[in-house]
Image: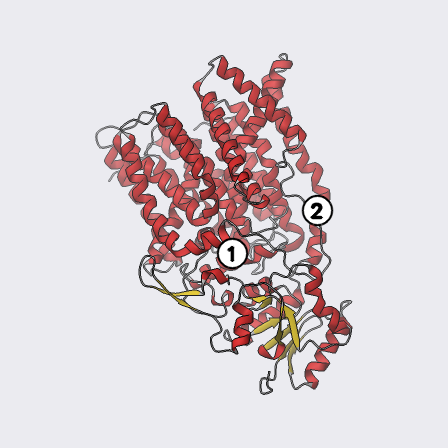
Amino acid sequence: MNLTKIITKEEFNPLLYSAIVLFIVSILGILLTQTSSKTIFYLIFAIFFYLITPGYFILLNFKNLDSLERIVLGMVISSAIIPLILYSINIFGIKISRINVFITILLVIIIALIIKNYRCKNKC
Amino acid sequence: MKLNKEIIVITLLIIFAFLGLVLRNFPFSQGNFDKMMPPVITSYDLFANIDYASWIYESEDARYYNPSRIFGIENSLVQQPIFFHLYIATFGKIANLHPFQATSFITSILSILIILVFFIIVKRYFNTTLALITASFALIPHASLWFFQMNVGFLYDYYAFLFVPTILFFILFSIDQEYSNKEITLLGIIIGALISSQWLSHFVELFAFIPFFLLIILYLLLKKKLTKKFKWSFLSFTITFLPFLVYFYSLTRKAHLGSGFLGSIKDSIHLGKQLNWPSYFPHLNLSNILLLFLLIGSIFLIIFLINKKTTTHKKIFILFIIYLLVFGYSYLIGINEFRTIRQLFNGYFLIFFIFCTGIYYSITTLFKWIDNKILTVGLILLSIFPLFANFSGVYSELQQMDQNSFVNENKWIALQWIKDNINKSDFVFYLNGYFHEVEMLAGKPYYEGLHLPTIEYGQKNIISLCQGEYPDNYYGWWGAAEYHPELGGYIKSRKGLFNFEMIMPLQNVDPLLNYTFTKDKKSPDYVPLKFFDYIVLQYRNTEYNSCMNFFINESLRRGDKLVWSNPEIAIIKINKTLEL
């Protein structure tokens, strides 16, 4: 799977801009609070990885949304889908450990990209 | 995505929200997320919310109740909506942040997201200017959240508030666009996931909104907007939602009917000075100004409809009418005022939007010479002004709350001692209240004089203590955090979809005591203090010092043992060899 074929530069840029905004916020956090930079880093990573990325990749499957809509609505969708999957697997006894949360998010991203790849085989 | 003014404003909005969060925490925890201690907590149910999230975070399991909330019973299936707490815990796992800190952080993030969703809806169906103004005004009630914290068990509702406008967006989006079968199927899954999340996070709100969504679908059917292609959407939606609907409804059906719809909120008992809570919904009380601009906004929308300006105006207007009908209907069927406020919040994007439409079109019609850019900036500044104007008052209120809030260093050290030195199975009684708080922070089962009708009842015991009467029998309506008689005990195991094996608490204690703790709470009862293993005493070195010293001396005289103390807290081990 060639990633550059699945995600165009235009589709990738909003993620980059989000990372820049988060970077500004993290600098403010370090300057204005007593929180350690390590904690701020983890927080910013969690916002990007948990909240922004999965939903954004899912919404890449809809062509009529603009970038801002994908970022914002993507965050709502991440906030719904990731806990929903974790809730479901937890019913079958799988623990909600850090590694399982991480794998779940990664799987959602990969599946969203696979769907996009499948949809875009002929024409996006 | 170009870096245009719209993105800059959104970025500033996010940074502003972040600053709000920092400012709120600053005087109390110095905005320090590294602290394994909650920042200022101003309410009773906030502890319960954080407690749920902490339990999931630490046990890595969302299926069971925290034993310390249910008489120490282990592995009992939870009958409460814990989805929001699961969200906090899982985010905390990735962020390496304990729910003590992650809870307020996540709630603030959600409030920013809610505003951004409003922005996106109005931008798509109207214009960027109106969207920016709506977002700015919608900021006002959320900023209350950043500056305070919500004073009731409102946090998990907040999660649900995000989903209603998002679901609306996707419904409008689905009827506006031309889609392939694959896209429409995926859209159904997304709407299904959003509704499932709302269902699992707060079923009451979904119940109240069922007529809202049904009316929208009915309208679309009448307008023949729902084409055959939508069958794929309905199918994928049903496949996504149905398992969660059935699984969760069967698990919580008694709670749905018992405490879900008809439940009411009771205040906790605090011996400290009772504060008047600030209004958390100052702009949602339908004040005259809001009503006036709502009316003007509605008139403009009607004018647009008559002029057939766009069909999107019509859609929003119809949504608003449907929403008002549902709002009225909920009020009529007797959902109490508190629930009504919840619903108002749930659909308040529509109210704010109409309000801002009223302001925007009134000014642009009356003052045609005003430049659009100046107008936009002016209105945004106008919306931000109340936040700053209120801040000094809010800040002093927060300081006052902090002085009356639960956690200080003496209490914190005592709580850590309880956590590390008292067995989970031991019965601990916190003589001077703050049950939720101690339970959460010390992680031990608690028993309380629950649901006392007035503060005076709660203080009755202390008053008699101060009059030199040792409370051999302590007065209260007794129970534990999650005990509701109508539930018939706790779930021990699930035998089938609607078949559960139940377990009753306190089976091995005196039948009278069991009855006292688990009966329907109709009248206060006395419980012998000898029932408990430990008594935790607060308020030493306060105006109640002599009363507390009296209690300690009397306890020691009766054979109890003072096992730990500091200038504020004393922990007494009850001599159980003596008969009750």
Q: Amino acid at mark 2?
A: Tyr
> In the picture shown, does residue B315 fall above or below B512?
above
> In the picture shown, does residue B54 fall above or below A23?
below
Q: Nearer the viewer, residue B73 or B528?
A: B528
Q: Nearer the viewer, residue B537 or B207?
A: B207
How packed mark 1 is, by other alpha carbons closer than 10 Å (few <14, some 14-19, many 20 or more), is many
Q: How far separated are the C-alphas under marks 2 and 1? A: 24 Å
User: Residue B472: image x %, image y %?
Assistant: 66, 78
Q: Chain of mark 1?
A: B
Question: Helix, strand or loop at disc 2?
Answer: helix
Residue of label 2: B395
User: Residue B459: image x %, image y %?
Assistant: 71, 65
How packed mark 2 is, by other alpha carbons closer than 10 Å (few <14, some 14-19, many 20 or more), is some
Say if residue A17 shows up in the picture.
no
> In the picture shown, does residue B280 fall above or below B82?
above
Residue of label 1: B99
Q: Quadrant of the C terminus of chain B?
A: bottom right
> In the picture shown, does residue B157 fall above or below B224?
below
Q: Amino acid at mark 1?
A: Pro
Mark linked to residue B362: none
Q: Give the residue drawn at x 57%, y 53%.
A: A35
